[in-house]
Image: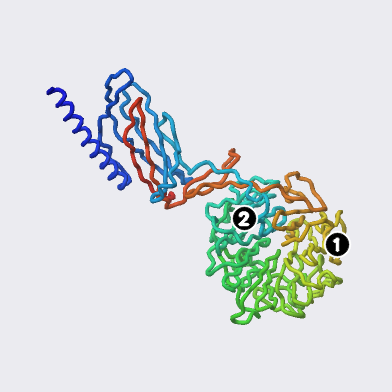
Amino acid sequence: MVSRMNESRALRAGARAGVVLVALLCALAGAMTSTGAWFTARAVDSGHRVGTAVLQPVLAQTSVGADLGVTLNWPAGPTAGETPRFLVSREIEGEPWTRVPIYHGTGTTVTDRGSDPADLADGEGGGFSKVAAGNNHSCAIAHDKAYCWGRNESGQLGDGTTTGSQRPVPVVRTVMFGRVTDISVGFAHTCAIADGAAYCWGNNNDGRLGNGSWNWVPSQVPVRVEIPGEVTEISAGYRATCAIADGEGYCWGSAVSGQLGNGQIGKDPWGSEQHSTTPQRVKGGLVPAGARFTSISTGTAHSCGVADFRVYCWGSGVDGQLGAPGVSGSAVPVTVFSLLGPVTEIATGRRSTCAISTLSIYCWGTGGPVPGTASSWPTSVSSTLFQRGASSLEMGRVDEGPVSNDHACVIASRSVVCWGDNVNGVLGRGTPGRRSTTPEPVDAELGIPWSVATGGKHTCVMKESEVRCWGSADCGGLGDGTGQSSSTPVSIAPIRDWTCPSGALLQAVVAPATQPTCSFAPDTRLVYRVDQTVGRWTAPTGITGVKVVAPS
């Protein structure tokens, strides 16, 4: 009888101890990190034998790597000859519904990067909003994200590698993770706008990435360009880049021909070519005070912009591309003469320029789309196709090798209309041919296109459901995965995307990996829970908190 009373008291004491233990664990969870009190677990097996194991909460030590992945290490508790098993789960602090298991096994370490990225056909079935073509690579925006294909020796595809691709690859979003609204392709660099901020990647010679770097080292992933105000348009040229922010024009990169429009030109007193590694405001010249830019374009050695419906150009004018007779070059904006009607769009090539006004399309300079004899006076491009207006004016230029003429394309009469140089079949007329100053529709059923993009060796057109390209496939520029040139439009390969779960960011591909990995965003606060099971017993949950801080 006394023995049964003592056993009853022991059970009541054990129950009180269990209540205290539960309260302790709740307190530890609130503090995010437990201290690991010992406790005794009792269990009865099928043979009615009583066993006892002494376990403690398992607490993980954490470290954050350069890739922002979190590595956890924890000790194995007393095992009494049995192998312990661990279940590790993670959640974002304050968001318990995000809890997911990240490890289950007998090991005592794991590296957590959020999870393996999911492979999604993000661009299939539509979602395109912009396409841009350069000399040997192209890019597109699909579902508010950027994708590129083609040549990549300077990292201009933005996928974290220098390996070219004949199919679209996603641009790494470690920094440029906002909604992409504009993208532009230069000779060997690319620039884009995401959430009103400017980003560039690829070749950084002359400071064309605009991030203040003096060592001219290229970047294989996007870098932020600091421009005051909200950026609404960006244009990547041969050796320079220009953008519009809050109605002001800004340019950076080479100024050897005055293409920055800020007064810099030629060489400095020490014989080095003038350039700027940070954005410089376009100022001076003939642009009236208070005028606001609404369109801007950067060519090979000159730039132009539309401010209050008038056109201004700066840089090299040796081929008449400034539209100002007698002006062979200017480091500040000059006015383009003889344009009738307000101008809405501007496009620059290698040796010529074109603009859309409410009354006509005008071109000036040398070769390519310029009708008749080359002239620094704007010449109207006559076509019945333009009677109902035109939009999405683009010019292609070859920025390497022998001097080549330019070609131009617009959306008009519910089709793509092109004229100018036809080397590599960039006019889309079924076969490569000589220069044509007669605007004609592309020889294909494209449906109703939304926009067009012209590169040096190829042309692309976009509608909501697809992007199609034609011309030279040099370095994969057509994006269809075949590597074969075509003088008629071919569809780019389906866009494959990699996405990470909430709280994680996509990291660049590092050779020899074939897909990117995920990591956590800086300043993310995480809670890890480690449960240890030994035989029939489970230790109380060990709770460890960590803040992801990027290495300095």
- Who is closer to the viewer here, 300 or 7? 7
- Where in the figure is residue 479, as x and y percent of width and height? 72, 49
Residue type at mark 1 is: Arg
Residue 449 is left or right of residue 544, and the answer is right
Identify the residue at image location x=34%, y=31%. Answer: 538
Q: Secondary structure at mark 2?
A: loop
- Where in the figure is residue 461, as x and y percent of width and height? 74, 58
Give the colour scheme of this rendering: rainbow
Where does the N terminus fall, quadrant-wise?
A: top left
- Where in the figure is residue 161, as x and y percent of width and height? 60, 46
Question: In the rendered view, would you say 316 is above or below 161?
Answer: below
Q: Secondary structure at mark 1?
A: loop
Residue type at mark 2 is: His
- Who is closer to the viewer here, 212 or 175? 175
Q: CA distance from mark 1 to mark 2?
A: 37 Å
- Who is closer to the viewer here, 267 or 518? 518
Question: In the rendered view, would you say 65 is above or below 187?
Answer: above
Disc tally is: 2
Which numbered disc, 1 or 2, marks the residue that appears first in the sequence? 2
What residue would you read off at disc 2? Answer: 143
Residue 344: quarter of image = bottom right
**Labelled pair 1, 2 in contact (Cβ < 8 Å):** no
